[in-house]
Image: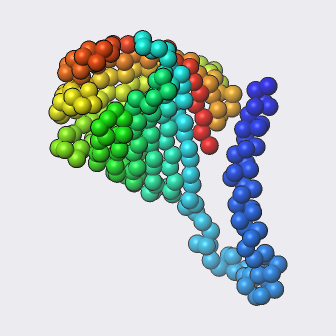
Amino acid sequence: MHTLTCRHFRQTLLFVGLVVPLISWGQSSSPMSAATQGDAPAPEAAHDHPHDHNDDPLLTQVIVDHLEWRDTANGSSQGLSAEAWVGKDINKLWLKTHLQQSDGAIEDAEVQALFSHAIAPYWDLQTGLRQDTKPSPSRTWGVLGVKGLAPHFFDVDAALFIGDSGQAAARVSAEYDMLVTQRLILSPGIEINFYTQDDAATGTGSGLSSSEMGLRLRYEICREFAPYLGVNWHKTYGQTARFAREEGEVENETVWVAGMRFWF
């Protein structure tokens, strides 16, 4: 069953990645017609122009890191954390999104559009915009951050956000994959958020605002698809905790999660 699922998943990727480009290629002039018109280079010409080969192709990737169901103190909720990029080795365009909904209503929604430039092996400098549409009112931020692999293969994403009203914030997240077996992977992670000003409208306080630690155990049916089970520990601090109490929300919470991770 596992082999069959992986086979179907890979066949879908193969269709998107190979069949569609072949259709586009077929709409252009065929090699035979090009040769007839005298446009095809002589066989030896390929050796005369080695730089005609595309050594830095345009690549794309979509990663759905968390698509999960959560058992919270106020009932169940659903969460999505995903990112996608298109570009070459040095420069890429990134999209990052985070969504959370409960009782059919979206409670948190964030989208980032970033330009990414490689500054060192495994490290990118990222700049762009972040838009928070939930909770209301919406907030717009400028973004300056770094993303990459720290020593011992910690996946790190750190960013500074400058708001349109003079507010500033910072976020640091890190994740690490530990192989239990070749298919079973334990992934601890942490995220910490800071703000420079109180924002009662969105329920965030100055200083250390919140932290979240997670532990997820996933099983890779194939490299591109893995269901998982896990637990999150969420905690708010200072004024943010006070805002949470005023809204009838819990300050500290342990949340069981079940979901899937996939990429293509």
Location of the C terminus by quadrant is top right
Q: Position of residue 53 (x, y in %)?
A: 62, 68
Residue 4: name its quadrant: top right
Query: Relative to 257, is 206 on the left or the right?
Result: left
Residue at 71%, 57% (x, y): give it.
20
Asked if residue 184 shows in the view, the reply is yes
Residue 74: name its quadrant: top left
* Color scheme of the displayed model: rainbow
Q: Is residue 101 above or below residue 263?
A: above
Residue at 24%, 37% (x, y): give it.
169
Location of the N terminus by quadrant is top right
Q: Position of residue 157 (x, y in %)?
A: 38, 37
Q: Decide which of 146, 55 is in the foreground and name it.
A: 146
Residue at 60%, 66% (x, y): give it.
54
Query: Relative to 190, is 251 on the left or the right?
Result: left
Q: Decide which of 39, 123 is in the foreground and name it.
A: 39
Q: Is residue 23 above or below residue 71?
A: below
Residue at 24%, 20% (x, y): give it.
243
Farthest front residue in view? 104
- Total numbered circles: 0
Farthest bottom residue in view? 38
Residue 27: name its quadrant: bottom right
Q: Position of residue 221 (x, y in %)?
A: 69, 28
Q: Position of residue 127 (x, y in %)?
A: 34, 51
Q: Is residue 189 above or below residue 99?
A: above
Q: Decide which of 258, 125 is in the foreground and name it.
A: 258
Query: Relative to 225, is 230 on the left or the right?
Result: left
Asked if residue 125 shows in the view, the reply is no
